[in-house]
Amino acid sequence: MYSSIPIVFLGLLFGSCVQINGGAVEVSWVVHANGRAITDCACAVAPNADPNAPPQPIANVRIEIVGQHGAIDGTRPCAGRSQCQFACQRQTGATPFDIPETHGDEMYAISVVAVGADGADLPGIKAPAPILRTVVRGQPTEVDAFLFEAACAMGCEGMNNSAVCARP
């Protein structure tokens, strides 16, 4: 029995390691429609300019990170990376620890983008302006919750009297 303890300890020690090549960025978000909370992201849709086109619900949320000043100016460490995109229902997401750390007056402009099921950005979903933060190697950089403003899908308004946009 005692001979298995070192093996279990080594397994936990090496199996739970996280590769650290920089800092991480952690964000959270909530979605509202016309001032009402949304409990199902499939109910949050972008208003369409074309009334004949079907509304696009929010499927995913992508973290956008853009370097400001110094050596990181204009860099986009999340561009094209699936590790920076999360299911909308999660309401939170964190990048791996590989965002290059900031030095001096360098900062990152951190924002979120609503993404449809087809992978396209949903420009009709309103999100707040980017938040500036520094990034430290080996540490998560937390950002205040972002508030998305969307429309409530017709099929979600139903007989709901609770002021929540949800499926009846």
Image (tube, helix red, strand yellow):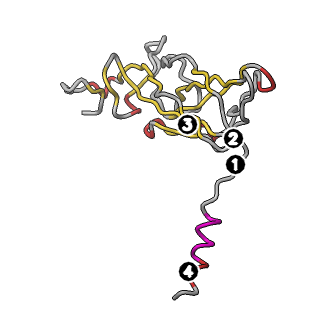
Magenta stretch encompasses residue 13 = yes
Q: Which of pointers 1 and 2 indicates the residue nearer the eye? A: 2
Look at the magenta stretch and give its main secondary structure: helix
Sort mark 4 into few (<14), some (14-19) or many (20+) by Cα contacts within 10 Å: few
- Residue at the far right in the pictured view: 71
Three-letter amino acid code of the residue under disc 4? Ile
Please give the residue where the numbered disc 3 appears in the rendered image: 26
Please give the residue where the numbered disc 1 appears in the rendered image: 20
Q: Can you say whether 31 is above or below 16 in the image?
A: above
State the image coordinates of residue 110 (x, y, percent, origin top left): 60, 25
Query: What's the magenta region?
Result: 8-15
Q: Which residue is drawn at 72% across and 23% down?
A: 106
In whole angstroms, how far apart are the C-alphas of marks 3 and 2? Answer: 14 Å
Closer to the chain start, of discs 1 and 2, is 1
Magenta stretch encompasses residue 137 = no
Please give the residue where the numbered disc 2 appears in the rendered image: 137
Q: Residue at x 58, y 35 (%)?
A: 141
Q: Are marks 2 and 4 in contact (CB under 8 Å)?
A: no
In whole angstroms, how far apart are the C-alphas of marks 1 and 2? Answer: 8 Å
Q: Which residue is drawn at 32% across and 17% down?
A: 35
State the image coordinates of residue 97 (x, y, percent, origin top left): 66, 44
Instruction: Locate residue 120: give its quadrant.
Output: top right
Q: Do the residues labelled 3 and 2 touch (CB within 8 Å)?
A: no
